[in-house]
Image (tube, coloured by chain):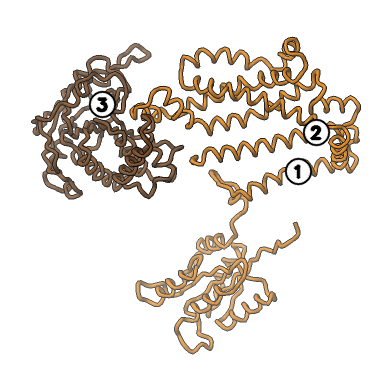
Amino acid sequence: MAMGWKRRSREVLIVDGDSNPDLQNLLEEAGLHPVHLQDFAAAREYLDAVVRHERPAPVAALVDIALAPGGSPSPDPPAGLRLMEEIKTLKLRPAIKVVPITGSGWGLDGSLGYEVLRRAGELGIVGWLTKPVSRERARRLARSLEPRRIASSLLQFNQSISSPARRFLGALAFVFPLVLWSALTYRGFVKPIFLPPPSQVIADLGQLLFHEGFSADIAASIYRVLVAFCLASALAAPLGILMGSFAPIEAFISPLCAFFRYIPASAFIPLIILWLGIDHAQKIAVIFMGVFFYLLVLIAATVANVPKEFIETAYTLGASRRQVLLRVVSPAALPGILENLRAMVGAAWTYLIVAELVAAQVGIGYRILKAERFLQTGQVVAGILVIGVIGILTDFGFRALIRLVSPWKE
Amino acid sequence: MSLALTADGEIKIWVERVSKTYPRPNGEVVTAVARADLFVRTGEFLVILGPSGCGKTTLLRILAGLEEPTTGNVFVDGVSVTGPGNDRGMVFQAYTSFPWLTVAENIAFGLRLRGNDEKEREEVVNQYLDVTGLLDSRDKYPKELSGGMKQRVAIARTLATKPQVLLMDEPFGALDAEARWRMHELLLEIWAKTRVTVVFVTHDIEEALFLADTVYVSTARPSRQKELLRVPLERPRTLATKGLQEFIELEMDIARMIRAEGGTGSQRE
């Protein structure tokens, strides 16, 4: 990242008829480089040089409002103010910050100091100084001239983030594992048999897709996940809504649900093979077992959080229990339920691979296992990456769906 | 204002010696409402006034049919209340406009439940959008509305189902003073137009006096004798009403009544 990082400028112009060693010392102590200029003409000369890039642009200009006119015939506007106006019209980035100074106080309404301060305020100033300047005041001014520290503006609580920034950061995160992977493999730290380089994996993926019918495996896996997940959702949503709404139903189902939830879905594989064989149905059943009971608990909790005032209001508007369930509880819980589904679809893929590692003839998991047997590590990695890509696309899809069905969400 | 609110009005609601007690886990029994007994006349604006914890919200919820009294009975139009229904609309302190519906859809909610004819529904919705000053916001979602506007949606939605009784549980408690005053005037305007019977719960003496025909003063001790206070202020009431000497004196009377141990009201009818 060598482009465009300029040295952070430290110059501060003090444009003042009197030299001000105290102020200069204080600014130096505060880490700035004060440049004293005698009058309007000297300041203008300096700024011309800045525009021609012959001098570094100062961070700020402290301008005495009682500046000698320096050849200007008319006293209005006062030379100090005119200089501040000219500084403001310079097209520099970052713009030079302006600080008016007075030795005679700012005065009250109607006085010259007051008028100049008002007009300088309209130009945009970052502060003002009254001579003599105290140490504390100089330090605070110096601090206010610093650019905002990046760290403090980058990470804030309750921060919102623009979508381009979100996309950029999301994409940026992929760079790190990719760089690490490339470094480990191309530099030969890791043998290709354990981890082949990215180019090899891409080549293997092409080989899989175009010569070994990998797309049929992908289709089979997606089909299994899709059917199992839709089935689990279609059952868990209504049942979860009932559980979240009615305590007796929750009391009835919860313990049984906990029982099944704690048994790993993979433990059912032998039984399921016995009952359903080794076709699609078996894989679907394993995924279903792995997802359904978790989904049920999540959805019930989401529904239980629907504000009770919504329900009571609906009753006083004449709704029946059924109408409350369909027209209040369900729409109120819908975005939350979709979030629950989004969280669990990843788990569905986990169980798919578990199911496909046992007794399968087609599927991404089957391919991964087969490739491993023949030490085709590139194909193993390619298979894993394909799952990751499908996962990220699913996640985007769910996000879009949630935005689509709940434009009313805060 | 054409509403003649006298004791001759028909009995709309009879709260007949209603008590509500809750058992605590330790076996203790908490009394929220003790032997509340009052009549509300048709078209009357009754305010139940009392500090928090005096059971006024519980009483209102019993009126709405959201809770059952432990003993006693509530009659509306001569029929015992057995559950919530759209003859008794309720507006809560919490914002209850449904966030997934637009303003117009919210107001249409109760009508839709009954399956009213689409055209008729549209008409009623427009009428109440107009009455509550929400015509410009008809297609907005509640997230885009201020607190006062959300409560206007809730009121319009309730009134659209043409309830016999409007129950309001500190509906303006979360609003700032200026918004609350505006809502007071709006509510009185709507009340004058619809002649609906209102039971309004609040802890704010000024609010109670400004709105009510009759104030039912409850104290922190539920067992104590309640005071029923007729508010003699003329209608229509405006902002200026709150500055009247009479208004301020009444306010002080009630404040003393609530504060004094066993205080007896001087304004008792």
x and y percentages locating residue A131 in the rendered image: 47, 71
Q: Which mark is residue A176?
A: 1
Q: Colour of chain A?
A: orange
Q: Check disc 1 and report its element: helix, strand or loop.
A: helix
Mark closer to the observer (2, 1): 2
Question: Would residue A245 appear left or right of A191 to someone viewing this image?
Answer: left
Q: Which residue is mark 3?
A: B54
Query: Which is more toward the observer, A352 or B176?
Result: A352
Work out whether mark 2 precedes mark 1 in sequence or the reverse, and give the earlier one: 1
Let me know if marks 1 and 3 both belong to one chain: no
Write down the chain letter for disc 3. B
Q: Check disc 2 and report its element: helix, strand or loop.
A: helix
Q: Residues within 10 Å of mark 3 (few under 14, many from 20)?
A: many
Q: Quadrant of residue A377?
A: top right
Q: Identify the residue at horizontal 20%, vertical 22% (top origin).
A: B15
Q: Colour of chain B?
A: brown
Amino acid type of disc 3? Cys
Query: Which is more toward the observer, A55 or A37?
Result: A55
Q: Residues within 10 Å of mark 1 (few under 14, many from 20)?
A: few
Q: Identify the residue at horizontal 63%, vertical 79% (top origin).
A: A48
Amino acid type of disc 2? Ser
Q: Which mark is residue A58?
A: none
Q: CA distance from mark 2 to mark 1?
A: 29 Å
Question: Would residue B76 appear left or right of A120 to someone viewing this image?
Answer: left
Q: Which residue is mark 2?
A: A215
